[in-house]
Amino acid sequence: MDRNQIKKWFKEPAKMANKYSLHAIYFCTGCGIIEVPPVITARWDAERFGVIPVATPRQANLFLITGYVSVKTLRAIIRTYEQMYEPKYTVGFGSCPINGGMYWDSYNTIKHLDKYIPIDGWIAGCMPRPEAIFIAVTHLWTLIDKGMANAYIKYRENYEFYRRNQEMALGKLEWPPLYPIQSDVRTVENG
Amino acid sequence: MDEHIKEQLESTFKSVVVTIAEDTRIVVNVKKDHVLAVLRFLKDRKFEHLALISCVDWIEEKEFELVYILTDYMQNGEKDTGRESLHLIVKTRIPRQKPLFETVMGVFSNAEPYEREIHELFGIKFEGHPRLIPLFLEREYEIPPFRKDFDTRKYVEETFGNIPSVENNK
């Protein structure tokens, strides 16, 4: 451990603990997932950075979206994201989640993922190298240090907006809202 | 073997046109009324594996082309003849205005997902298919998305272009 960081550990232990134990959810979208097995296994060994894959979203706080997002996958992504504990961080991997990439004019692919769930950072490239994941992780550390990795707070604040966007893409959602929606509260008060 | 199958097909069915495209690849053009009979005939001659059903939209000729690919690798494996397995490509055309065809599930029961896929992406209805429900898609499309007259760019701009980004939520 870096001796210079001891002060930080005493000052904000929870933040430091979050930072060095990122539990990434296994979620295989698109072709980018092919980069993840070498990253988590002996060749690149993500555990050096405190990143470890876990089985379910309820144990995870890092969400890597690794490739194009079809309409059907978006439904699963939203459900997964909403099940994760806070603080949670999302990273879009590859050019497809950013703006659709080579699937831009496809009839069934979501173009801008950050319209539906908040994203902390992007890794550009098609495909990015495994090293790019570690660069992203170290950038994420910096963001957490500075208190800028607050996409989950943004989601809470703009939930109504995100939910509306999700409904525009997917039609009616079959699960209840994660946070209370203002307009719903108002109708209850009036009724 | 290739010539043998060709002779058999041409002598049994009058309207069939058989061309040998490559060593192990035979193209059989069939009128749409005879497809089931030809497939049944070929199945009896050890072409037991339906590998794929595909569809082509010939928009200028106003026709859909259905492509059935059969192989005989089962028989090949048993006898170990040392040659590659034979691919038989059965092609038929149906009119674009009336996209209706009969299911081949009575001959090859593994045609079920292929026919559902073609029904979803090209809008061809297969009579006699037990469950023509969506396979991949969630959204509704006015024109099935794999037809040539489906304007993808216009569709994308209309559907996803109107969704605002979060920065506008101020």
Image: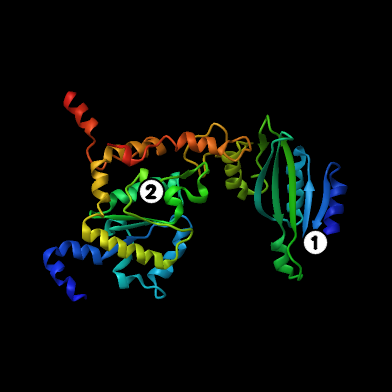
Residue A191 in which image quadrant: top left
User: Is residue B17 shown left or right of residue B87?
Assistant: right
* Mark number displayed over residue A76: 2
The amino acid type, in three-letter code, at marker 2 is: Ala
Residue in the image at 57% along x and 33% along y: B143
- The answer to whether any part of residue B50 appears in the image is yes
From this view, report whether residue B144 is shown above or below residue A151: above
Same-chain status of marks 2 and 1: no
From this view, report whether residue A154 is shown above or below residue A129: above
Query: Could you classify mark 1 by the number of other residues whose Cα lies within 10 Å: few (under 14), some (14-19), or many (20 or more)?
Result: few
Residue B63 in which image quadrant: top right
Helix, strand or loop at label 1? It is loop
Helix, strand or loop at label 2? It is helix
Q: Position of residue B27 (x, y in %)?
A: 78, 51
Residue in the image at 28% along x and 53% along y: A84
Q: Position of residue B82 (x, y in %)?
A: 76, 71
* Mark number displayed over residue B23: 1
Which chain does the residue under circle 1 lie in? B
